[in-house]
Image: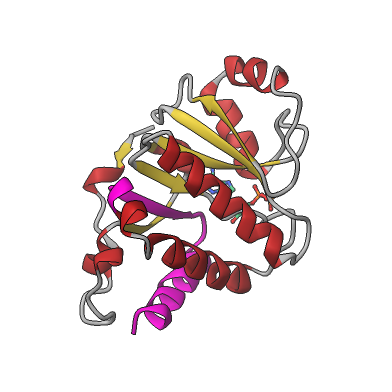
Amino acid sequence: MSVVSVASLPTVAQQLQGKVRPSALLNVLSVWQGDITRLRADAIVNAANSSLLGGGGVDGAIHRAAGPSLLEECKALGGCPTGEVRITKGYNLAATYVYHTVGPVGEKPALLKSCYTNTLNALAQNQVRTVAFSSISTGVYGYPPQNAAKLVVETVKDWLQTEEHLQSVDRIIFCVFSERDRNIYEAVLMAAFE
Ligand code: ADP
């Protein structure tokens, strides 16, 4: 399967040119529709479950693409509470690291916000400059995708308001799997930056 380098993807500023107000923040954001395991980024963010032992959805896809060494490393971590993040290598993935965050089951905004904020803080601390987030909790865990996208965009926008944070990243990708979710993200970004 062909690998996509995240640095080559258009930014939201380019994708939604004319539909959004110019903003330095939009130069570090992208929306990309596809399989997150294809992305060559410093890190990809997995929607894990609290056991960290793999599952369905994006978690299963990441484990399949990374190979069995990922599960071995995950076993040694002893799980992860909801809203927190744990870090492993990417093994056979094109991405160097996997950040595993555990989203809430159902619509629990404070916990979903924690997933993104804790992950962003850990990325900055580790000097990770390109990252792709999967849409945490919006599959089997049942968070309504539109509400999740609003919260995610607001959370990332707030986080990037600090100059230190803005300088710490080259690209944050919102990796969406369906066309419906791509439309949701584009509309939410337009509303947030109109
Ligand atoms: P959760 O249990 O946190 O809801 P899921 O994996 O069920 O996690 O779904 C999270 C999101 O990941 C959904 O939007 C789903 O469509 C998407 N998804 C599933 N497979 C992939 C993949 N290979 N790459 C990117 N996103 C994916």
Write the residue at 24% across / 57% down: 10
Q: Is residue 64 positioned above or below 112 on the image?
A: above
Question: Image quadrant of residue 109?
Answer: bottom right
In x, y percent, where is residue 71? 66, 20
Which part of the image, by quadrant, shows the N terminus? Answer: top left
How is the rendered protein coloured? secondary structure
In x, y percent, where is residue 64? 58, 27
Q: Is residue 162 visible?
A: yes
In x, y percent, where is residue 155? 51, 65
In x, y percent, where is residue 115? 62, 51
Write the residue at 46% across / 69% down: 185
Query: Is residue 130 found left or right of 180 in the rendered image?
Result: left
Q: Is residue 169 visible?
A: no
The stretch drawn in magenta includes residue 140: no
- Region rendered in magenta: 167-194
Write the residue at 42% across / 79% down: 192
The stretch drawn in magenta includes residue 192: yes
Question: Image quadrant of residue 108?
Answer: bottom right
Q: Is residue 28 positioned above or below 146 on the image?
A: above
Question: Image quadrant of residue 68?
Answer: top right
Write the residue at 76% across / 38% down: 50
The front one of 18 and 162 is: 162
Which part of the image, by quadrant, shows the C terminus? Answer: bottom left
Total label count? Answer: 0
Q: Is residue 39 positioned above or below 90 on the image?
A: below
Query: Is residue 150 found left or right of 192 in the rendered image?
Result: right
